Amino acid sequence: MDTTGIPHRPGRLPVIGDLIGADVRTPLQDTVRIGKTLGPIFTRKFLGLELVFVSGVDLVAELNDETRFGKYVGLGLKHLRALGGDGLFTAHTNEPNWRLAHDILQPAFHAEAMRGYHPIMLDVARELVASWDAATGPVDVSADMTRLTLETIGRAGFGYRFGSFERTEPHPFVAAMIRALRFAQLSNVPLPLVRRMVASSKRQNRADLALMTGLVDEVIETRRRSGEDSRDLLGLMLSEGHPETGEKLDPVNIRNQAITFVVAGHETTSGALSFALYYLTRHPELLARAQAEVDAVWGDREPEFAEVAKLRYVRRVLDEAMRLWPTAPGYEREARADVLLGGRYRMREGDWVIVPLPLLHRDPAAWGPDAESFDPDRFEPAAVRKRPAHAYKPFGTGERACIGRQFALHEAVLALGMVLQRYELEPDPDYRLEIVESLTLKPSGFTLRPRVRTDSTLGRV
């Protein structure tokens, strides 16, 4: 792409570019900080690699035009293909298995399928509550949300129990996954010594990939041997063909899709829940409002399937948390042909740019001068209708948007609602938000003391 005239940070040096002052541990947060001063399009250069970032809502609306641009699988995603192969998240759109898997798996997220997942989600949320009931001190929110979401996708999607709440340490799959995501994120760092200091070694990465693929292969083989006829994700992949051609997924692609759903299906949702709890506990008046809604809609009962969607304010809390810190923090768009972006910036066919979502989601043109503040009422229906359609994209865009969005939202609203229904949440007053980056974002070191609500806080025992 012709970057002439595109702003960059002052002080760029020959050869090394913008390397001075960059932190390889927090590249996204660095980009957000720099982008706030540079405007809707800017570049960052590291040695021979120059990256173009686009965050203005008008330019992003152009990039989201599927007739002119498509998903680009590069940077961290390219390196993550060692794990996910041609799974839905890491596949190139022109790879045959992307469309095949997408069409086969769509029924897994229709309303009737979601109704079937609800009891499983409820069971896992009960385990989280039991764990917090038994806690004698602060709980690690991100760790426990990861336990919750990993267990949910394992059971609902694949009939597999990770035993997450029976362990004092994360499941080995989680430890391997965290290292693998970090390794993929930092594979583009142009300084090998720095990369080795921050990420795991290539040898460790190979071991992590082997552990993850080995577990998934075991889950698939167990299901094959059992002969179980299930309509969950794994059942559809093993038994169903394409609705028009009858073509089925090959065994390698089934593995790739399973790994994709286990990783993507829990890592992002756990981050969204963690950020939502962080912001609620920093705004007691909003926490009280969310709890009042849960009390009014659910009372002291566990919710039926249809009652989860009735927590409209709780849903807005999650939307606002994902606005400020979308746990899948960006996507890349590639020009399908030569194009002039914004009538000014020349892109040739195959040129690509990055959309950093925390910047798009803070664009004052769409969100106003208080875009940094946490305000769930931004997602009241009237406010949503007034905003540009492309101002909010936490699940990606176009045909490559997240296929499991409804699964994630139902799970997140259910879990957050049950936590609010059960507990008063006491934060550490000295904690300041620290975000750990891999290919996703999560709060680091964020703890809460959950105290079971009583008649003095609840109006009922």
Image (cartoon, rainbow, N blue to C red):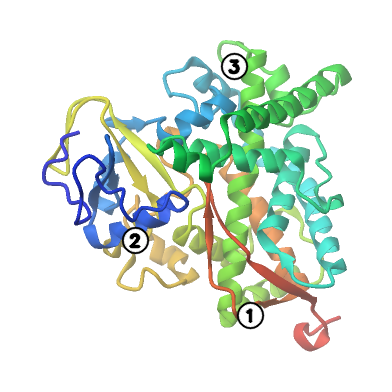
> Where residue 225 sits: x, y (%)?
86, 17
Q: Is residue 154 above or below residue 222?
A: below
Dot 2, crowdedness within 10 Å: few (<14), some or many (≥20)? few
> Where residue 132 sits: x, y (%)?
81, 66
> Residue at point 76% right, 32% down?
158
Q: Amino acid at mark 3?
A: His
Contact between marks 3 and 1 (CB within 8 A): the answer is: no
The disc placed on residue 242 is 3
Q: Disc 1 designates what residue?
A: 288
Of the numbered discs 2 and 1, the one sitting upstream in the chain is 2
Q: How many marks?
A: 3
Q: Amino acid at mark 2?
A: Arg
Q: Disc 2 designates what residue?
A: 33
Q: CA distance from mark 3 to mark 2?
A: 45 Å
> Residue at point 23% right, 49% down?
42
Which is more toward the observer, 144 or 189?
189
Callout 1: helix, strand or loop? Answer: helix
Q: Is residue 110 visible?
A: no
Q: CA distance from mark 2 to mark 1?
A: 32 Å
Q: Quadrant of residue 47?
A: top left
**Of the two numbered discs 2 and 1 in the rendering, the one whose residue sits closer to the viewer:** 2
Quarter of the image where the C terminus is located: bottom right
Q: Is residue 352 above or below residue 330?
A: above
Callout 2: helix, strand or loop? Answer: helix
Of the numbered discs 3 and 1, the one sitting upstream in the chain is 3
> Where residue 297 sits: x, y (%)?
70, 69
Of the numbered discs 3 and 2, the one sitting upstream in the chain is 2
- Residue extending farthest to the bottom is 456
